[in-house]
Image (cartoon, helix red, strand yellow):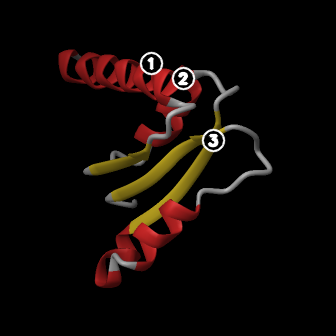
Amino acid sequence: MKKIILTTLNSRFTHTSIALRYLYANLHELQESAEILEFSINDAPQTIAQKLLVSKPQIIGIGVYIWNVSEVYELLHVIKKSLLMRRLY
């Protein structure tokens, strides 16, 4: 299980986030407990949230850009709701 997930919503699957790779490179000894997961803004927020939360990470770092801010906001809402439901059951 990875404790740290670095993620973002790219405009297309062919794009990659250089920022996430810079962050990962500077994690040094924490790299062993980190992974990068990238998605597209066309992916369903519920699906993304499930994939992010399946390993029960302690930290989720999300790269936000001017063009994906509304999709990230929606994703955060789904993540919060999912975590709240887990606590209730």
Work out whether 72 lies above or below 29. above
Determine crowd level at label 2: few under 14, some 14-19, many 20+ residues with C-alpha closer than 10 A.
many
Residue at 58% in and 27% down: 47
Which of disc 3 and disc 1 is earlier in sequence? 3
Residue at 67% in and 56% down: 16
Using the image, tell me which numbered label, if any, was put on residue 45. 2
| Nearer the camera: disc 2 or disc 1 | 1
Labels 1 and 3 touching (C-beta < 8 A): no
> Is residue 78 left or right of 89 when viewed as pictured?
right
> Is residue 50 left or right of 84 when viewed as pictured?
right
**CA gap, disc 2 and disc 1:** 7 Å
Residue type, label 2? Pro
* Pointer 1 residue: 74
- Residue lying farthest to the left in this orientation: 88
Percent coordinates x, y for residue 11 in the rendering:
69, 37
Q: Which of the two residues, 41 or 87, is positioned nearer the viewer here? A: 41
Labels 2 and 1 touching (C-beta < 8 A): yes
Secondary structure of the residue carrying numbered label 2: helix
**CA gap, disc 2 and disc 3:** 10 Å
The picture quadrant where one finds residue 75 is top left
Residue type, label 3? Phe
Which of disc 3 and disc 2 is earlier in sequence? 3
Residue at 53% in and 21% down: 46
> Is residue 86 left or right of 24 when viewed as pictured?
left
**CA gap, disc 1 and disc 3:** 14 Å
Using the image, tell me which numbered label, if any, was put on residue 39. 3
Secondary structure of the residue carrying numbered label 1: helix
Percent coordinates x, y for residue 9 in the rendering:
58, 39
